[in-house]
Image (cartoon, helix red, strand yellow):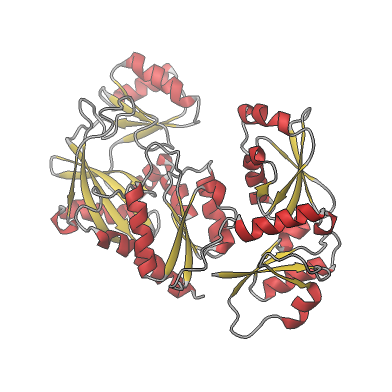
Amino acid sequence: MYKTLLVTDEPIEAGCDDGLEKISFQSYLKDYPKLNEPRIRLINLCNTEKYLSRGYYCSLLAESRNHLVFPSVRTINDMRGGARTLTAQQLELNNKDLAALAPLLSGNFLVFMGSAEIPELQKIATKVFRRYTVPILEIGYELDSGEITIKRASFSDLSASQQAKFFNIIEKKGPYTRSSGRKKELRWDMAILVNDQEPVPPSNKRAIGKFVKAAEKLGIRASVLNADQLLDINHFDALFIRETTAINHHSYRLACEAEANGLIVIDDPDSILRCCNKVFLHDAFSYKKIPSLQTEIVSDNSQATHLALEALFDYPMVLKMPEGSFSLGVFKACNRAELRANLALLLQGSALVLVQEYLYTDYDWRIGVLNGRPLYACRYYMAPNHWQIYNPQSKRNFSGGFETLATYEVPKEVLDIALRACKLVGSGLYGVDIKVSNDKAYVIEVNDNPSIEHKIEDAWLGEELYMQIMSEFHRRLELRGR
């Protein structure tokens, strides 16, 4: 749990009875660090415009004292010298977003610790605050150029009502304010990243709740957050991603940011990078001689390519987008016309497409692996009247049945190649998809963000599945130290 200090150039006048601890820079310089102090979150409200100013030294001293400080010295340097500009593309805002927001952006608006003073502008505020983690920002929008302008705002320039609003946000509406009535003091803080809008999330709500309870038993306070709520990654000791990952996505960027700041991260950035792209996996499987389905990587839709593929494979062929999940971006071509049409579609979004031999089985194995050891095992059966375990075109029969087994019931060959495949990726939490035909096992892919749902993957281990995953976080946190 963090104790929050607000540091200003000069002492704040009495009369702000909001329960926040506000001190002057002079007090912070002389009175800190203190013996046996709790973890400190410091909000630096001093003027940071000038190099070697009080504001600059406030953040510099905070970093040397291992206090979590906003803004960091690096951010101060990035913001020095006037306004910064970001394009809508850099902020991942589409034309629809800008059209909806444009009427509200006729003038500049303030952002207090990531919270916009105009609620409709919160989306922009959140995205800007992630790039420039400054306590008070002033944001504007140039309609003609479509650029977002960002500059640091001074606390001393705020009106009395704006200062009161700022304090209110810090005290009551901050992103990680917790109840003071909690009896049990926990050592670690974990963020569990979810997406409430995701139609097929990796974990359902019951499973997320069981992760939270398992974490608490091990001294870890787990907060379940959407990406828009995860403004302050440094508040946490660990990040557990339970949202479908992708490279060009906030899940990957948050994983990178968390790892760079010393958090324990599952899925770690390398695992996301390697698992999300099937081109990497295919190449790695080939190099390490891990049995997998025959695959060709193609980059064009020419007749020569069609003829070459037909010389290698019989119809049907399976075509895959290198990055995709839950059977999205995967097509079956039963003839030349379908091959041409599906290649044309996939090559619009990717320079490379994987073409793979078709192997139908009644079910796919999924072996859950954590830090190089098998954790759980499932058989996922094909969706009704479909050739994959997921059928994105059907709402009623989206997926097939399943069977959860103890790992010791899994054929040895299946377990062995699952573990070998995971060694190519890393030491995180993975789900390895395997087909077995004529007593031979083939790795299909390794998933960095495997499904763990209540009453499915936990059907054999029950609560122990969640405890084992949280125990791995606990082990890594202990090795990292406080």
Percent x, y of residue 481: 49, 75
Residue at 84% from the left image edge and 49% from the top image edge:
82
Percent coordinates x, y for residue 480 in the rendering? 48, 72
Q: Is residue 189 left or right of residue 261?
A: left
Observer-nearest residue: 406 or 247?
406
Kindly indicate the quadrant of the structure image that contains residue 96: top right
Measured as percent of width and height from the top left, residue 247 is found at 50, 43
- 270 is higher (above) or lower (below) than 354: below
- Give the image location of residue 56, x and y in percent: 79, 66
Counting the numbered discs, the total is: 0
* Up-down relation of residue 383 to residue 342 (above or below): below
Q: Residue furthest bottom?
A: 35
User: Which residue does the image show at 41% across and 50% down from the upper left?
Assistant: 242
Q: Residue at the far top: name it.
A: 337
Relative side of 432 to 84, left or right? left
Quadrant of residue 409 within the rendered picture: bottom left
Foreground of the two, 45 or 286: 45
Please state which of residues 201 and 431 is positioned toward the viewer in this rendering.
Answer: 201
Compared with 36, 221 (above or below) is above
Q: Is residue 66 visible?
A: yes
Does the image show residue 135?
no
Closer-to-camera residue (208/16): 16
Give the left or right position of residue 29, taking residue 469 as reference.
right
Residue 121's place in the image compared with 185, above or below, is: above
